[in-house]
Image: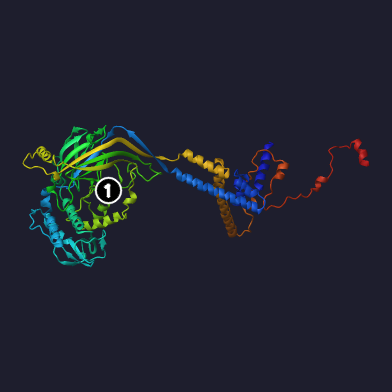
Amino acid sequence: AATAPGKKITARLKRTLPVRGPQAPTLSELMRWYCLNTNTHGCRRIVVSRGRLRRLLWILLTLSAVGLILWQCAELLMNYYSASVSVTVQFQKLPFPAVTICNINPYKYSAMKEYLSELDKETKKALETFYGFSEGKSKVRRSVDEWNSTESDFFQQIPLLKVEDFSRTATDLHSGQKRKIEGSVFHKDSSIVNSGDSNDIIGFQLCDANNSSDCALYTFSSGVNAIQEWYKLHYMNIMAQIPLETKEKLSYSADDLLLTCFFDGLSCDKRHFTRFHHPLHGNCYTFNSGENGTILSTSTGGSEYGLQVVLYIDEADYNPFLVTSTGAKIIVHDQNEYPFIEDIGTEIETAAATSIGMHFTRSRKLSKPYSDCTETGADIPVENLYNKSYSLQICLHSCFQKAMVHSCGCAQYAQPLPAGAEYCNYKKNPNWMYCYYRLHEKFVKEQLGCQQICKDACSFKEWALTTSIAQWPSTVSEDWMLRVLSWDKGQKLNKKLNKTDLANLMVFYKDLNERFISENPANTLVILLSNFGGQLGLWMSCSVVCVIEIVEVFFIDSLSIVMRRQWQKAKKWWNDRKQGSSGKAPQASDVERQGHDNPVCIDEDLPTFTTALRLPLPQDSPLPRTPPPNYSTLRLETAFTEQLPDTLELGQH
């Protein structure tokens, strides 16, 4: 029963006394309370220091310390997201990589003549017109296939042009007539180095089939480059119309390309090679592809324990306009990687022995937040068209092919075919050349967004190659070696091979050192937090509890004070509006009549007179005054009916 009045008095004191601490009504009071009660000495010295100069010095010192803390913590945070590189070298038995070999000439020219007769005829005519030489009447057999008339018409639409002195007129090398260059676009894909007459430039013009005034003139650094580019453009159009089965028959078989084979000192044959068809290089053959689930390895370094093959190049059956070099192309790659022969292939010379020594390196990078690489490519919004493990090249080529299908309505011949699409050709897509060149120009200038979308792979394998070349076969051994190889090929002595038709290739590990390059975090989370604590303690004598206090006061409490003041203003405005509409005289608001809970009185003990005097008075409240006396209480009333004898005498005096 005694506690109930005490609780009422405590609650009344809480409501009437001014508010301090986290529930202060203003931000200035909150900041003052924080500076007086915080463990960071600088903030307290700002409040308790006497004199403006001393207070200003403490403000400067405290702000400087805060700035140093922010700078050091930012450095620590940046260092946390950095990585250190470690290199590990191991000596062990190494898996042998896949080795893909292609003839530089993709298809036998003798088998392709019927498909290329019209194109070869136009090319020879352009050479005769521009350079003034002729090979006489063409002995190329003309095909009776239905597309040749279409091709001939298209050659007339996109002929080679000779532009004179950058004028807007050009000579058509197909008909010899002059034609005006229409359109607003005049494009040069390279610096011009003139061939023949210094005032003559050779190239070709492409126009939008739907808008003849939208054209682009493509010029080249020499007539050779212009003729080759023009030839390849029409060549891809023709090859896109030939079925895959037919193209595989037109290219080289394993028996045609491979003469001898040795691996790790043992004989091998075409059964160790896997064929795949490359759009630009025809039939290619991969040694140790791993398709049967077995990957060969080697336990000894040196040329005697690698792959040794002799290749038959057959230079006489090369396409004279498509390729200008003789030999083969090889690429060393992982079994799960796609061999980009056209991008990073190494050329092998004929009549020479080419030795390629390898060093194997595995690399591993950290993904986010340390770098922008991808683990498997699953997070890249580009479909993998190559059915191989992700790589940056696969992503870029797939992205361009998707853009080609979307913009031009057909797929580019040199890259895999997306589902539901077909390769571009003149018959179905007469505008594909113009569209392709425009799109490729945007791709090179990084305007398609492919370079921004595609990322490097976090894990990859690399074989560093060292190439050396020697003359092969030697003069003294040339005769008998060529005869033996001719016999092995089944020609016996009817036709002796020429050494320019042969290439000797050796691929081997120079040593069995496997280098593993990996990235590791430079700092762990524990080290980062320790460094943060050291900086806070050094500059502000602050701990984790102090940081929590700062978060509570400067964010939570400050926000609650602002929201409380806004709510009070809104509530006062609403009450005034209600009173104005009812016509009543304005009265003191609820906020003015009510007090606030004072956190000073938080104990359950009854307040004493001494503690009550120590409590501050509420703001905007009158000082307490002594109440007037109640005169009725001055009446003397005795509790006794009779006066005591000892007081009677005293009362008389």
Above or below, comparing residue 208 to residue 370 in the picture? below
Q: How many marks?
A: 1
Judged left or right of residue 329, residue 610 is right
Instruction: State whether residue 322 appears in this view.
Output: yes
Above or below, comparing residue 465 to residue 117 in the picture? above
Residue 169 in the image, given as x and y percentages of width and height: 20, 67
Of 540 and 309, nearer the camera is 309
Judged left or right of residue 166, residue 40 is right
Name the image colouring: rainbow
Q: Image quadrant of residue 386? A: top left
Judged left or right of residue 192, residue 156 is left
Of 608 and 206, nearer the camera is 206
Q: In the structure shown, which secondary structural element does the residue marked by tag 1 occupy?
A: helix
Quadrant assignment for the C terminus: top right
Q: Which residue is mark 1?
A: 398
Residue lying furthest front in this view? 476
- Kind of residue at disc 1: Ser
Instruction: State whether residue 590 appears in this view.
Output: no
Residue 447 in the image, given as x and y percentages of width and height: 32, 55
Q: Residues within 10 Å of mark 1 (few under 14, many from 20)?
A: many
Quadrant assignment for the N terminus: top right
Q: Image quadrant of residue 651? A: top right
Residue 561 in the image, given as x and y percentages of width and height: 57, 50
Judged left or right of residue 489, residue 368 is right
Q: Image quadrant of residue 178? A: bottom left
Residue 537 in the image, given as x and y percentages of width and height: 56, 42
Of 245 and 328, nearer the camera is 328
